[in-house]
Amino acid sequence: MSNRSALLLDKFLCWWSAQVLRFSWLVILLFIITCAASIDYTINNLGVNTDTSKLLSQDLPFQKNRSRWEQAFPQDAATIQLVVESPTAEQTAIAAKLLAKRLSENKQLFEYVYIPDDNVFLKQQGLLYLELEKLDDLSTTLADAQPFIGHLSQNYHLQGLLDILGKALENTDEALPTDLDPLLEQIDQSLIAVQSNQTRYLSWQKLLAVNESSDRNTLRSVVSARPIADFNSMKPVERSMDFARSVVRDIQLQDPQVSIRITGKIALEEDEMRVLAEDTVYSGLFALALILVVLYLGLRSVKLVLCTLIALIMGLILTAGFATIAVGHLNVLSVAFAILYIGLGVDFSIHICLAFRECWEHHMTSEEAIKKSVKILGSSLFLCALTTSIGFFAFIPTDYEGVSELGLISGGGMFVGLIVSLTLLPALLKVFSIKQLSHTQVTKLPDWLCTFPIKYARGIRYTSILLAIVAAFSLNYIYLDSNPVNLRDQSSESVVVFKELLKSKDRSPFVLIGLSDSLENAETLATRVKQLPAVNKTITLSSFVAKDQEDKLEIIEYLGFILGTDLGSFDRPLEQADSRQGLIDLRTKIALALANPAGNTSPELLDKLNQDISSFIGFADASEQPGSIYQQLDTSILGLFPHTMQQLNTSMQAYFFGLKDISAYIRQNWVSTSGIYKVIIDPRNDLNIAANLAEFATEVQSIDDSVTGLPVSDLAAGKVMTKAFIQAFSTAFIVIFLVLLIILRSFRNTLLVIWPLLLAGLLTVATNVLFNNPFNFANIIALPLLMGMGVDSGIHVMHRLYAGVKEGEHLLQTSTARGVFFSSLTTLLSFTSLAFTNHQGIASMGLLLAIGISFTLICTLIVLPAFSHKRVPL
């Protein structure tokens, strides 16, 4: 900076501080009024955009592809998935159907609800989707079971079932099947479960091999629902999610064996904002508490701490107002601006208060100390605000809009902090009338430590260069994690269930979606993609047209003839009968069968069943309400029987159909109103593994680069993040270098400030690699920020080195060194509090910033003096 410029700036700062001190109460009043207006404006106008798809520019190709898909099939976008699971296929289907019904009835909260693999059309035509061989096997099983079904239709109670089993054991009816072991074993387990007071249902679908004939996992069903969201709210789907959870609780109370868990894009975002809302408040309060402790240790004055705290809070309020005006909303990343401001905004106040202390200890009056502090620090504080804001502003031109907004808010916040520190803080210091301070012993550090950077300058220089070379090798091991799921709380239900689904080949949420303007083109794409090693299968509208329908319909017609009207007889409650007598009669038949073995029934199983029947009867008869115990057994064995029979009865009504006959319910999910056809592409491998995800997305995109879906979005987002990081870091480095060069007017001195920052950056990256803390959506902003923040300390140290220190005093004993140390410590503690949040992205950002600030502090106080001990005046 030229002598003329420096002189003009000194004059301005002297005039400014004089005016502030002259009208101190007016300044404070104006700030109070402005903060009140800022609070009111922020509350009424600051929105929250929790849609993570908006974190990256909407003009990117993959974002346009996603938007095209969501516009064509809005029911697929912004949904939650309610994953229903139970021990039996029947319980799962019943619970899923009830859940879908309850949710769809509330049109104020849910726009669209459906079960992809469960609707009237699929139920009726279900048997036609089986392979011919499996359908033939099912036909044989059901034909063998016809005597049981027929007998139960006339004797619809547990005693009727036990009676027909007794006849089978007597082998008096050759039409009865000989392999009774599976049914007997299930009845035996039900006896044990009821006696042990455990809920258990016999699965007739499994017993009759109905679900074993299908390749779908019928123990799990997914209900997809699109809640009506308000993205201007911090919790945009809170009402919808609360209602869904209340329905889930009701269903699980009815059947405790049913598990319903919620995941999907909206649920993940809702959980994320919940964690952020909770953890940001706690982290902010924790950071503020730590900062107050550090401030007191550094300033040694309650009044100085109070002045700093008031300035910090008012600066934060004004920054929130600036965010409202400049952006208008917060996103999942920019919500962290408050923590960033607390950690950085306090630095200016610390330096001024420490300089004030030092001047006061030199027997200046309070006003003289304030003026002197503003004069000697004003220019360096302005430069610090400028360079720190550059680290934030460097993200504004990038396609990473989430961080771009954070950069704009926090960068502007640095100038808010500067104005507050040079205006409000001096006024507060004047009003608080600080007339007495305890003298600080600044020479507590041992002499060897104070002289260390100068005494061992040569060794420090060589060591720093060597460390930089070694750390540079870590750049080859940098890993970028672009999966946003890994940023969230890994213990939350939505993340746990989401990762479970990723392992599934049939229900993975990481499917890819292809769009075609005709069914023919959709089929061509599906055929080509299906050949890829990373693809499990593809689904189009044509996939719903069953093959070999004529042959299958012949089998179904034969089954209908064999089973007759019996299947339609089970739409009524179980009849009352004497289950106890039925067990006694069966026990008698078992004893006869054991005495005269016949058929293939296992003697060991019969003997066990005989003992368990006796035990159960004794248990039930000894209970206070024997009738209730026997009723539990009835329900355990036959409770799900009607559902299976009704499902079979519906599937007996199958008919020949073609593409045009597919129901509108299915068609609307595969053909848009504008004539766009959808192709679903399922992955073959577990996409929890990043390499599998990249392989899947890359292979499919090699066939069609317009496909969309989470794998493509994550892969593309990773590239955008990398580009944004390189662009932001390069911009921050070049602009900061030029700013320093212009102001310091010395290439050597500029390098002296920059070199410790580069070294700290390399050491930070190396440590990050060592801790296996990959770069991600959140922490990628750390290095450009460290460049902006770290240069502040270098500027203060350089300013003090070239301004000179008192005779017999060393740099590390000055108020500048204490200011650098305590300001870095407050920033470090603020960011460290982020490392303990449950949001993995914010936590990784906090960890990375904490590591970086630690290295920056060491390099600034040790390495910079070592390189600059042979200095020339500015």
Image (spheres, rainbow, N blue to C red):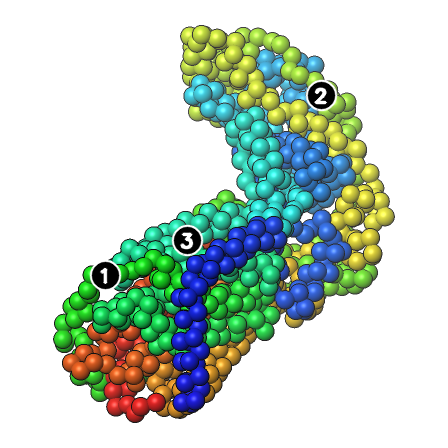
**Disc 1 versus disc 2: nearer the observer:** 1
Q: Say if residue 687 shows up in the picture.
A: no
Identify the residue position indicated by label 2 in the image: 571
Tell me: 733 left or right of 98. Answer: left
Q: Are marks 2 and 3 in contact (CB under 8 Å)?
A: no
**Residue type at mark 3?**
Gly
Identify the residue position indicated by label 3 in the image: 284
Q: Residue at x 49, y 62 (%)?
A: 778
Report the Cα–Cα distance between label 2 and label 3.
60 Å
Question: Relative to 381, does residue 290 appear above or below in the rendering?
Answer: above
Q: Mark 2 or 3 closer to N-term?
A: 3
**Disc 1 versus disc 3: nearer the observer:** 1
Near mark 2 (Cα within 10 A), the count class, few <14, some 14-19 or many ≥20, is: few
In which quarter of the view is residue 680 placed?
A: bottom right
**Residue type at mark 2?**
Asp
Residue 118 image position (x, y, % from top left): 69, 39
